[in-house]
C-alpha cells in the first residue's frame, strides 16, 4: 500500500479532526502518501481529493466539526456511484481508504470492499455511540460533556421557578447519551428507547418526587424514546395530568455535535488513526478499529454493523437509587 485516502462521512462528531490528523500523520510516519477526500463518499465519487502531509493537519486537534466536511451520499448507495468512486480512486493511484463515520458509512465501505476487493478500514465517529465493537465512538464523550453542561444551566432556571423541564438529547435510536447525561446531571427520570417506563409510571414517579419535597425537576428524554409522540406532546400530557408543576421543554439539538473535543476524544482519535493505518499496512482490511478494555482492537465490519451496542443497565439502577 502506497497511497491511503481518509474522509469523514455521515453526521459529524467532535474528534473527527483529531482522527484525520492521526491518519495523515501515521501515513507520514510510515512514508505513505495520504489524500484527504472532501464531503465523504460524494467527494470520493467526484474525485474531490487533496494530498495532505503532516503539516496540512496542524492546529486541528482541538477543533470541532471536520475540515474535510461530511455528507450522507445517496449516489454511493447505487452500483454506478460506487463504480465512479472506484474509478476516481484508481485514477489517483489510491490503494486503500479509512472512513471515519457511523454504521451507514461502514456498510458502504463493506459493500465497496466486496465489489472491488479494495482495502478499507473504519474509525467509529458519531456522538450516538451506537456501534458494536467499541465502548466509545469519537465524539460521544464530548457530546456527553456538552449536554451535561447545558442541563446544569437549565437546572438553575428550573430551580428558580420551581419548574419541571423535559430536556431532549440526541442519540438517534439509542439512549446512551440520555442515560449517561441523565445520571451525570442528576435527572429525576431518564427516558430511553431501550426501556419503556410508561406514562403512568412516569406520572407516579414525578408525583412521588414532588411529595418528597422536590420543588423542581429535570427529565432527560432521548430523541428516540417512544413514550410520547414527541417531547412536546409528552410535556403537554404531563402538564395536563399533573397540576403540581409548571412544565417547560428544551431540545438541545445540534449544539451536542459541535465544540472542541474532550481530551478523551482527542486521545482516542489519535490511537484509532494509528491503528487504522498500521492495520492496512499489515494487510488487514474490512475492519473497524474500536476501544475494548482500554485496548484498540479490530472488529470485522459485518459484526460492527449488525451487532447491537448495549445500554449499561447498571446505570438505570444507579439513577433509580440516586433519585430516591
Ligand atoms: O447521528 C448523529 C445525529 O446527531 C443523531 O443523534 C441525530 O438523530 C441525527 O444525527 C441528526 O441528523 P441531522 O444532522 O441530519 O439532522
Image: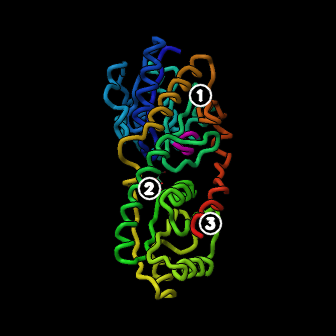
Residue 148 location, quadrant: bottom left
Residue 72 visible within the image: no
x, y percent for residue 169: 46, 60
- Decide whether the magenta segment is chiefly helix, strand or loop: helix
Q: Mark 1, mark 2: which one is toward the viewer? A: 2
Q: Between marks 2 and 3, how big is the CA–CA gap?
A: 18 Å
Residue underneath mark 1: 116
Q: Does the magenta stretch include residue 44?
A: no
Residue underneath mark 3: 320
Q: Mark 3, mark 1: which one is toward the viewer? A: 3
Magenta residues (range):
102-106
Q: Say left or right for 315 vs 250.
A: right
Q: Say left or right for 213 vs 292.
A: left
Q: Choose between 202 and 22: the one closer to the eye.
A: 202
x, y percent for residue 57: 35, 26
Q: Choose between 136 and 43: the one closer to the eye.
A: 136
Whichever of callouts 1 and 2 sits on the residue coming sooner in the sequence is: 1
Amino acid at each position: 500500500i502506497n497511497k491511503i485516502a481518509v474522509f469523514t462521512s455521515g453526521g459529524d462528531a467532535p474528534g473527527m479532526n483529531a482522527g484525520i490528523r492521526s491518519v495523515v500523520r501515521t501515513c507520514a510516519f510510515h512514508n505513505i502518501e495520504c489524500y484527504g477526500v472532501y464531503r465523504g463518499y460524494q467527494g470520493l465519487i467526484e474525485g474531490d481529493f487533496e494530498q495532505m502531509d503532516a503539516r496540512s493537519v496542524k492546529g486541528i486537534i482541538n477543533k470541532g466539526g471536520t475540515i474535510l466536511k461530511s455528507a450522507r451520499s445517496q449516489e454511493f448507495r447505487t452500483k454506478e456511484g460506487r463504480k465512479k468512486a472506484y474509478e476516481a480512486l484508481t485514477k489517483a493511484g489510491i490503494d486503500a481508504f479509512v472512513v471515519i463515520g457511523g454504521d451507514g458509512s461502514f456498510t458502504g465501505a463493506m459493500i465497496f470492499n466486496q465489489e472491488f476487493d479494495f482495502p478499507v478500514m473504519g474509525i467509529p465517529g458519531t456522538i450516538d455511540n451506537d456501534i458494536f465493537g467499541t465502548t466509545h465512538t469519537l465524539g460521544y464523550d464530548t457530546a456527553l460533556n456538552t449536554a451535561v453542561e447545558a442541563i446544569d444551566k437549565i437546572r438553575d432556571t428550573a430551580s428558580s421557578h420551581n419548574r419541571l423541564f423535559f430536556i431532549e438529547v440526541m442519540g438517534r435510536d439509542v439512549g446512551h447519551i440520555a442515560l449517561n447525561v441523565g445520571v451525570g446531571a442528576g435527572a429525576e427520570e431518564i427516558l430511553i428507547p431501550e426501556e419503556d417506563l410508561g406514562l403512568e409510571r412516569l406520572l407516579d414517579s414525578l408525583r412521588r418526587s414532588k411529595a418528597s419535597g422536590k420543588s423542581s425537576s429535570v427529565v432527560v428524554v432521548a430523541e428516540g424514546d417512544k413514550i410520547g409522540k414527541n417531547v412536546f406532546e409528552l410535556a403537554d400530557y404531563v402538564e395536563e395530568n399533573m397540576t403540581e408543576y409548571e412544565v417547560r421543554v428544551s431540545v438541545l439539538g445540534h449544539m451536542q455535535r459541535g465544540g472542541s473535543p474532550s481530551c478523551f476524544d482527542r486521545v482516542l482519535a489519535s490511537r484509532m488513526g494509528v491503528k487504522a493505518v498500521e492495520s492496512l499496512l499489515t494487510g488487514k482490511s474490512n475492519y473497524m478499529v474500536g476501544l475494548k478494555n482500554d485496548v484498540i482492537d479490530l472488529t470485522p465490519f459485518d459484526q460492527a454493523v449488525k451487532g447491537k451496542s448495549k445500554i449499561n443497565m447498571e446505570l438505570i439502577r444507579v439513577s433509580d437509587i440516586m433519585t430516591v
